[in-house]
Image (cartoon, coloured by chain):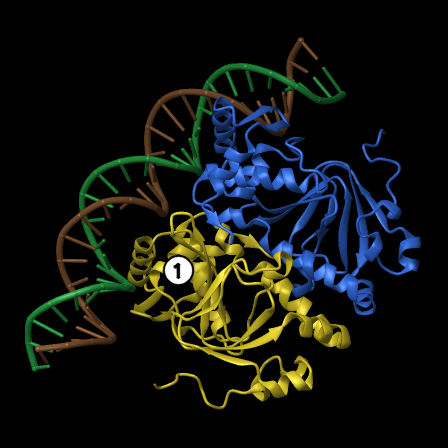
Chain colours: A blue, B yellow, C brown, D green
Amino acid sequence: MPSSIPSYLSCTRCTFAPFCLTEEHRAAKQFRTLERNETLCLPKNKFQNLYVVQHGALKTYQTEADGKELIRGFYFANEILGYEAIYTGHYLFSAVALAETLVCEIPYNHFLESLQSKPALQKRILYLISRQLNVGSYLLSTTAEQRLAAFLIDLSVRLHPLEMKLEFLLPMSRQDIGNYLGLTAETISRIFSRLQKNNIVSIDHKKIHLLQPEKLKQMVDGLISH
Amino acid sequence: MPSSIPSYLSCTRCTFAPFCLTEEHRAAKQFRTLERNETLCLPKNKFQNLYVVQHGALKTYQTEADGKELIRGFYFANEILGYEAIYTGHYLFSAVALAETLVCEIPYNHFLESLQSKPALQKRILYLISRQLNVGSYLLSTTAEQRLAAFLIDLSVRLHPLEMKLEFLLPMSRQDIGNYLGLTAETISRIFSRLQKNNIVSIDHKKIHLLQPEKLKQMVDGLISH
DNA sequence: CGCTGGATTGAGGCCGATCAACTTCAGTGG
DNA sequence: CCACTGAAGTTGATCGGCCTCAATCCAGCG
């Protein structure tokens, strides 16, 4: 079974390495590899670990009474999953891998201890949680086009934290995008077609190219941020 | 000018007292009283303080290019406002009082120091931030009725943290509710009328009584939480 | 090759927005 | 005391965006 995960991945390359946990933990290399569609955690499970995504992508979702799933978020490399669970003591969402994915398990009690002993780490973590509070704020946009435009910009930033790329692969299906944005797969498809006709993006299946990112931003930019 | 703020309010009654900041800070009593419609912070301001609401209510909002305001949240007694700003370094939202309101100012550097020196406080704060991550998740509900029902339940819990009351005063206008939920004031009004006709709630201006809270929960309860 | 799930495109229906009229209420000043 | 004013709330009629249902197309894979 060929792996899409680069073999050079290790703690030394990890974004969090400068802030990482105890030497013992680092030595333990609490990695976990997930196949596509493999589950990372379930709502019934007791909350014990935070997860740092090292490579790949996951989605979190809840299940409605009628069995439909309701997607609550996507997580990519260098992002941390599990904060929401701190307050309930068990995971609120199911999390599954959208592709082959590598995560690093961080026991929450280790996490707390490390924060206590490392002021720089504490500051950094509060910063990251604060950022998390603002993720997905565009879900409140009124029109479907605005929401999708904001989603694409968000993706282009989060998939390539270092250098913002305008060409990338959509890690999730149209169905998942629509579900997350409170829309249907058909609506997503229609808007993609419209954006492509207007030369704002070009799309070939999963591959997307933001041809005029500034126009995408205009669509959203109702908001004055300062 | 008569004050609606109880005179007995002080740090000794504060929910956060057991976890509160340095003795010096507590002695300083960094209280700030806000009149109705008075602004607490602005997006252009540099982030320096977190605010603990002691009494009253506030709303946060952003302003769109066309001048319309977009309400992002409500804050009531015993809630903390400002976390989102940690990551940008300046406030993202404007915050104004919906009624006469008392807040306690906590300088962020004091906050960090206190967390560092008090493990119990750190744990508590992470818990509260985690809870914040889940507030407003019902904004993703599909129908207007679901969103309003969830909002009412949320209010009934948050306005009376100790004993959940079914009768309370709406701190904000129909316009504000609609804006927050991504709906119009007319829609809010219509749904209120419908809920009243069905004896699910009774409403007299600001005064609302949840007659059948279990029915309200049913409307929302698509979600399986465990 | 056929099969299966995802994606695209079309036709029709419904929910909530928009626009407008009317009522109520709080505050103000005569 | 009442007239005036403006904001907030209620209710009705119409319109439009997105959902729903359905058919077709396509890629991946046994």
Task: Give residue B195's quadrant in the image.
Answer: bottom left
**Chain of the residue on which disc 1 is drawn:** B
Question: Residue tagged by mark 1?
Answer: B177
Q: Percent x, y for residue A63?
A: 59, 48
Residue for point 73% across, 59% down? A124
Q: Which of these two is toward me, B225 or D11?
A: D11
Quick one: quadrant of the N terminus of chain A?
top right
Residue for point 39% across, 83% down? B4
Residue B180 left/right relative to A177: left
In this rendering, is residue B161 above or below A30? below
Q: Which of these two is toward me, B138 or B128?
A: B128
Residue for point 53% across, 78% down? B162
Circle 1: residue type: Ile
Q: Percent x, y for residue B117?
A: 77, 76
Q: Secondary structure at mark 1?
A: helix
Residue A218 left/right relative to B67: right
Residue A107 left/right relative to A155: right
Residue B98 left/right relative to A21: left
Q: Percent x, y for residue A4?
A: 81, 32
Q: Which of these two is toward me, B73 or B37?
A: B37
Callout 1: few (<14), some (14-19), or many (20+) C-alpha neighbours within 10 Å?
many
Any part of residue B49 in sight: yes
Residue for point 50% across, 55% down? B138
In this rendering, is residue A196 above or below A162? above
In this rendering, is residue B47 above or below A148? below
**Which residue, as the protein is rendered here, is positioned at the far bottom?**
B8
